[in-house]
Image (cartoon, grey):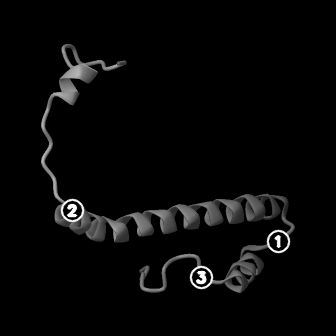
Amino acid sequence: SGSIQKFIGLNSLRAIPILFNKETINAYSTLTEVIYLRMNNILLQNQQLAQLRDWLLPMLMNGQVTVGEAEGMVNGLGMVAEERTRYD
C-alpha cells in the first residue's frame, strides 16, 4: 500500500521467500552495532556543537565576548569530538 512502483504490492512482497539464519543475523548485528553507536555519538556531538554555536554566536556578534575569551570558554567545556580523532 502506498508504493510508487507499479505492480509491487504488499501481496507481491509477502510471496517472496526470504532465507536467513540466526548466525547471519548475529554477524550482521555485530558488524553494524559499532556503526550505529558511532552514528548516535556523532548526532549527540552535533547537537552539542549546535547548542554551543547558538550560545556563543550572539555574544560574539554583540561584542560581549572576543574570540580569545570564547576559546577559553570552549576549552573549559571539554572535548566534544572523539579523543582518537586528530584534526589538522
Is 80 above or below relative to 11? below
Nearer to us in this view, 45 or 10: 10
Asked if labels 1 and 2 touch by Cβ distance under 8 angstroms, the answer is no
Between discs 2 and 3, the one toward the N terminus: 2
Residue at (68, 84) in percent of width and height: 75
Hey, what amino acid is under mark 2?
Lys
Kindly identify which numbered label has been placed on residue 54: none
Residue 52, given in percent of the width and then of the height, sits at 70, 66
Q: Amino acid at mark 3?
A: Met
Q: Is residue 78 left or right of residue 73?
A: left
Decide: few, some or many residues near mark 1? Use Cα within 10 Å; few <14, some 14-19, many ≥20. Answer: some
Identify the image quadrant of residue 79. Answer: bottom right
Position of 82 compared to 68: left or right?
Answer: left
Q: Which label number is shown at residue 65? A: 1
Position of residue 60 measured from the top left corner of the image (x, y, whole percent): 77, 64
Calculate the distance from the C-alpha at mark 1 to the C-alpha at mark 3. 21 Å
Badge 3 crowding class, 10 Å Cα cut-off, few under 14, some 14 to 19, many 20 or more, is few
How far is the residue under mark 2 from the one under mark 3?
40 Å
Which tag, 1 or 3, sits closer to the chain's start? 1
| Among the 4 quarters of the image, the one containing residue 46 | bottom right
Task: Tell me the mark number nearer the camera, choosing from 2 and 3.
Answer: 2
Q: Quadrant of residue 37?
A: bottom left
Residue at mark 2: 22
- Mark closer to the chain start, 2 or 1: 2
Q: Which mark is residue 79?
A: 3
Residue located 73% across and 80% down the image: 68
Q: Which dot, 2 or 1, sits closer to the camera?
A: 2
In the rendered image, the vertical position of residue 46 relative to residue 14, given as above or below: below
Tell me the element at label 3: loop
Residue 84 is situated, as x and y percent measured from the top left of the image, at: 42, 85
In the shown orientation, is residue 71 left or right of residue 42? Answer: right
